[in-house]
Amino acid sequence: MKVVRHTMKTRNLKMTITEYNNLVELYADRVYRFVLKCIRSEELAKDIVQESFARMWKNRPEIDGNKGKSYLFTTAHHMVIDTVRKEQRQTVVEQVPERGHESNYSDLREILDEALEKLPSMQKSVIVLRDYEGYSYKEIASICDISEAQVKINIYRGRVALKKYIGSMETVI
C-alpha cells in the first residue's frame, strides 16, 4: 500500500500583475468612496487611493494575491487616520455653534454628513465601511485591524452619537 503524504500546498505569495490589475479594476472606486467619505476632500482622497495602490505595487512580492483587497483597504484606512491626525495638528479647532430649533435644514443627508464629520476617525471609518459600503463585521475588523467586538462597539457608539447630533426629525424639518 502506497502512503500519500498530504502536504500543504504552498502558494507563491508574490502577487501577479494580473491580480494587481484585477484589484485596481474591482476596488479603485470603492476605496475612493470610502476615503472620500472619511476625509471629505476629493483631491486628498485621490492622493490616498493612488498612494495605497502604489504601496501595494511596491510590496507586491510580500502580498498574497487573495488578500489584496484587505491589504488595500487597510492601507487606505491607515493613511486616512494619519491624514486626519496631521490635519488636526495643523489647524485650530473652530467652535461651531449648535443648531437651534430655528434652523431650517431640510436636507437630512447634509446634516448626516456633517454629523459623520464630528465622529472620531475609527467610528467614522467603521460606519462608512458598514453602512455605506456594506462590508461585514469580519471584513471591517480585518481592514481596521481591530476585533469584531471592537467593530460592533465603534458602530454602536458612532450611531448613538449620530442620533444625538441629528436629534428628532421635527428639529431637522
Image (spheres, rainbow, N blue to C red):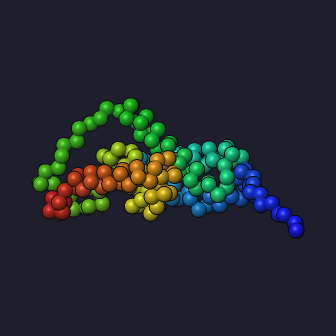
- Please determine whether, in this image, residue 4 is positioned above or below residue 40: below
Q: Residue 61: image x %, image y %?
A: 71, 46
Front position in the image: 161 or 99: 161
Query: What residue is rendered at 62% in x and 54% in y?
Result: 68
Specify the quadrant that holds the C terminus: bottom left
User: Residue reaching furthest left?
Assistant: 102
- Circle count: 0
Front position in the image: 138 or 86: 138
Q: Residue 113: image x %, image y %?
A: 32, 54
Res. 89 in view: yes
3 horizontally vs 98: left or right: right
Query: What residue is rendered at 26% in x and 61% in y?
Result: 108
Front position in the image: 2 or 67: 2
140 horizontally vs 118: left or right: right
Res. 42 in view: no
- Which image quadrant is residue 121 in? top left
User: Residue reaching furthest bottom?
Assistant: 1
Query: What residue is rendered at 27% in x and 51% in y?
Result: 161
- Which image quadrant is residue 112 in? bottom left
Q: Residue 77: image x %, image y %?
A: 49, 47
Specify the quadrant that holds the N terminus: bottom right
Query: What residue is rendered at 23% in x and 52% in y?
Result: 165
- Which image quadrant is residue 134 in? bottom left
16 horizontally vs 109: left or right: right
User: Residue reaching furthest front?
Assistant: 1
Front position in the image: 35 or 138: 138
